[in-house]
Image (tube, rainbow, N blue to C red):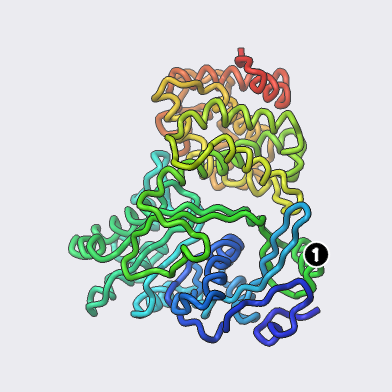
Amino acid sequence: MQRLCLQALGALPAGVAAPRHDPAALTSGIVHVGVGNFHRGHMGVYLDDLFGLGLGHGWGVLGAGVRPEDDAMRAALLAQDGLSSVTERAPGHVATRVTAVMTGFLPVEPAAIVAALTAPQIRILSLTITEGGYFLGADGLPDLSHPDLAADAAGAVVPRTVFGMIVAALRARRLVGMGGLTVLSCDNLQGNGAIAERLVSGLAAARDPGLADWIAATCAFPNSMVDRICPAVTGAERARLCAEIGLQDAAPVLCEPFRDWVIEDRFAAGRPPLEEVGVTFVADVAAHERMKLRLLNASHAAMSYAAALTGHAQVHDAMRDPVIRDWLRALMTREVMPLLPPLAGQDYAAYLDSVIERFSNPAIGDTIARNAAFGSDRQPKFILPSLRDALAADAPVSGLALELAIWCHYCDVTAEAQLNDPRAAELKRRAAGPVAEGAGDAGSGFLGFAEVFGELGGNARLGPAFAQWRQRLRDEGVAACLARYAEGLPPA
């Protein structure tokens, strides 16, 4: 089998498309932290399309990482000259291409990232570090008291966080009279750019208010909405995919055909003309973010626990189960969609239909385990915002309470080691507690886990609905509760 590398581009297997540009013509304009499957299947594809038009060749990507496991990705990609194979799959559709957007991959060391960000040709730092990389508290705001952030705020010689590295680089750029950077978050967070700005500005202000003012004046932190399903490809799946495409790739990307990217048009030092390849630039991305996070990401977060508890291992299998599909549609239609503000040109019901269709794609092989992981990070970002809005508007919350009760039930009956959550032990302890959670029990019950639920633990409307669904789950099982809600029946 042909190994992926620059020398192989002239003799790729049949059906594998080569880049339409010369990789050697690229120069670095972007440092990207988090070169995982999503980045390479999303931003990497858009840039490869752009370069193939003969545009933007000064916006090549220098890869970077901050986690120990990024070393393995660095080694894999450098061994194949920074190239990636990207395979799109859907019923009746398979297409594989090789993308060439990387100009290198920095050593996984803070000093290397800081040094790269001080190079004058680098104008954008982009991030795919997952939701957990932003140190968010239950209020959705960065917790600047976190030990790693506190160390960076105090001036740690070696920055502990990517945001500490950004501040160190910006300090160096200011000292030599260089301009600022654009920090472009590509993570699934509403207001992802604003959150990144809060972290960078907060760390800078803790040591040097003048630097914080300079950052505000010279840097940009655009919000963005990213959308493409790119599941992990590991072990035997990797071997099968390589055999299918006839190409040996140490880190192949598998994804759905659908992709979308909406970005606020606020950049500090220019940007690649990505509108030429389908990226949408807008003045305010908030409504697009809210739609995607509360309908697509929230649907993933909601259905995963019900699917796991009813014996499903794959997302597409769960979507073929009418009990889960009908419950998910009812939940989103009754309690989430009505809270979304109008968005010009967007039909939310049609968008939800497309989400369910995408989840039903058997060619992707997305797993329930992937979507059920890190619930204590994902529930506050994707489910609780709708719940807070519903409570504030005195709107229905029965289905959202059921979703939380199902997550609680999942934590109760699943072995701690299988929860795959940094707060697994505490979630399991609380889930095993009494069904009824009144305001007086808010500190010890599941909803009283303030790091996750904030003030919701003592809410007079949520608590009873949650308790009633928990009791029904114990008495009748998950499928019966899902059907009950889909039919419009109350928990009690």
Q: Which residue is mark 1?
A: 240
Using the rendered view, name the quadrant where residue 406 is placed. top right
Q: Is residue 206 visible?
A: yes
Secondary element under disc 1, as helix, strand or loop, is: helix
* Percent position of residue 332, x then y: 57, 31
Specify the quadrant that holds the N terminus. bottom right
Q: Where in the figure is residue 334, as x and y percent of width and height?
A: 55, 25
Q: Residue at x 58, y 80 (%)?
A: 21
Residue appearing at x 29%, y 69% in the figure: 180
User: Which corner quadrant of the image does residue 409 belong to?
Assistant: top right
Say which amino acid is labelled 1: Arg
The answer to whether any part of residue 381 appears in the image is: no
Q: Residue at x 68, y 68 (%)?
A: 252
For the residue pair 321 and 383, the one nearer the viewer reads as 321
Question: In this view, which residue lies farthest toward the top?
Answer: 492
> Residue 400 or 72: which is nearer the viewer?
400
Instruction: Residue 419 in the image: state x and y as whole percent.
Output: 64, 43
